């Protein structure tokens, strides 16, 4: 694709057009090894080697990042008072068109997809597409087996909101923990579901979306860019028992 240099840099980086103009006037931008003075230069985004302030900028149409969100960050592109998950990204990932697909609460940890692909984001979030999200939940009081039936039968939360049927199961090894599978994302849904059964969530972690689990080597606050085959896993049906057994395996390892 052919594009103006300043347009290309303003989409692929976090710099504004006027910052890019300044960087160009300070000889900080090269194309195929030559210093460029003209910000309107047309470049071939597939073949040109563009370096901005020592950093190679590679053209990417779509980008997919899986982050292990720590507590204390909000899932938003900007916020006047809070730190956002985008603040955790290194400059080369901080493009202007990216956003977190869906929200985890400020005190929830775990898997967040950050992307510029609106279509994929919609596919993952829309209950119609039946993409499961898995939450590992810690509770104030022990898990009760009666929750299994209650969650299966359109649990009513806060009087008037009805949840889709959800699968939940406790663990023999940890009586205050549970795995919950949801196909929708109502506001504070996990916390409100457990409060509807007179319990309270004390820690919440999203561990998987579709068939893609958060990679075990990604610590809190870290992230990886994922490629096509892992993006496809996000859309692949998953199985509650497989996720449950993996967690049991993690407990014993
Ligand atoms: N449900 C909640 O209550 N909080 C989250 O962060 C995600 C799901």
Image (spheres, rainbow, N blue to C red):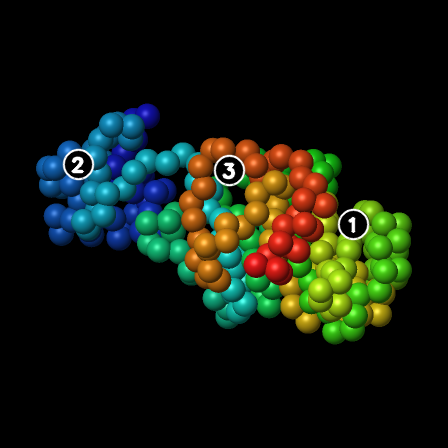
Sequence-wise, the earlier of marks 3 and 2 is: 2
State whether residue 79 appears in this view: no
For the N terminus, give its image quadrant: top left
Q: Give coordinates of residue 113: x percent, y percent.
A: 53, 48
Mark pair 2, 1: CA separation: 54 Å
For residue 45, which quarter of the picture? top left
Q: Nearer the viewer, residue 112 or 120?
A: 112
Instruction: For label 3, count other residues whose C-alpha is less than 10 Å away and answer few (under 14), some (14-19) or many (20+).
Output: some
The label shown at residue 24 is none
The label shown at residue 167 is 1
Sequence-wise, the earlier of marks 2 and 1 is: 2
Secondary element type, mark 3:
helix
State whether residue 171 appears in this view: yes
Q: Which residue is mark 2?
A: 31
Instruction: For label 1, count other residues whose C-alpha is less than 10 Å away and answer few (under 14), some (14-19) or many (20+).
Output: some
For the C terminus, give its image quadrant: bottom right
Mark pair 1, 3: CA separation: 24 Å
State the residue at coordinates (71%, 64%): 173
State the residue at coordinates (80%, 65%): 143
Sequence-wise, the earlier of marks 1 and 3 is: 1
Mark pair 3, 2: CA separation: 32 Å
Disc 2 vs disc 1: which is toward the camera? 1
State the residue at coordinates (32%, 36%): 59
Q: Which residue is mark 3?
A: 230
Q: Give coordinates of residue 225: x percent, y percent.
A: 42, 45
Secondary element type, mark 2:
strand
For residue 199, which quarter of the picture? bottom right
Assess mark 1: CB under 8 A from ligand 1? no
């Amino acid at each position: 694709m052919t594009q103006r240099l300043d347009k290309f840099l303003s989409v692929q980086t976090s710099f504004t057009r006027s910052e890019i103009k300044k960087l160009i006037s300070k000889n900080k931008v090269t194309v195929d090894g030559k210093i460029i003075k003209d910000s309107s230069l047309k470049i071939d985004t597939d073949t040109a080697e563009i370096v901005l302030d020592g950093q190679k900028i590679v053209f990417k149409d779509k980008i997919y990042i899986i982050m292990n969100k720590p507590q204390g960050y909000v899932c938003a592109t900007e916020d006047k008072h809070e730190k956002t998950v985008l603040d955790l990204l290194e400059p080369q990932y901080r493009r202007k068109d990216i956003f977190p697909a869906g929200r985890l609460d400020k005190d929830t940890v775990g898997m967040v997809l950050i992307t510029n692909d609106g279509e994929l984001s919609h596919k993952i979030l829309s209950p119609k597409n039946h993409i499961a999200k898995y939450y590992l939940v810690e509770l104030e009081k022990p898990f009760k087996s009666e929750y299994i039936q209650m969650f299966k039968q359109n649990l009513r939360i806060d009087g008037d909101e009805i949840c889709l049927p959800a699968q939940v199961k406790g663990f023999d090894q940890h009586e205050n923990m549970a795995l919950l599978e949801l196909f929708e994302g109502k506001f504070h849904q996990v916390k409100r579901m457990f409060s509807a059964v007179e319990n309270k969530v004390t820690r919440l972690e999203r561990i998987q979306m579709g068939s893609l689990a958060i990679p075990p080597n990604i610590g809190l606050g870290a992230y990886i860019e994922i490629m096509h085959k892992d993006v496809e896993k996000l859309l692949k049906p998953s199985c509650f028992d497989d996720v449950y057994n993996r967690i049991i395996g993690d407990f014993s390892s």
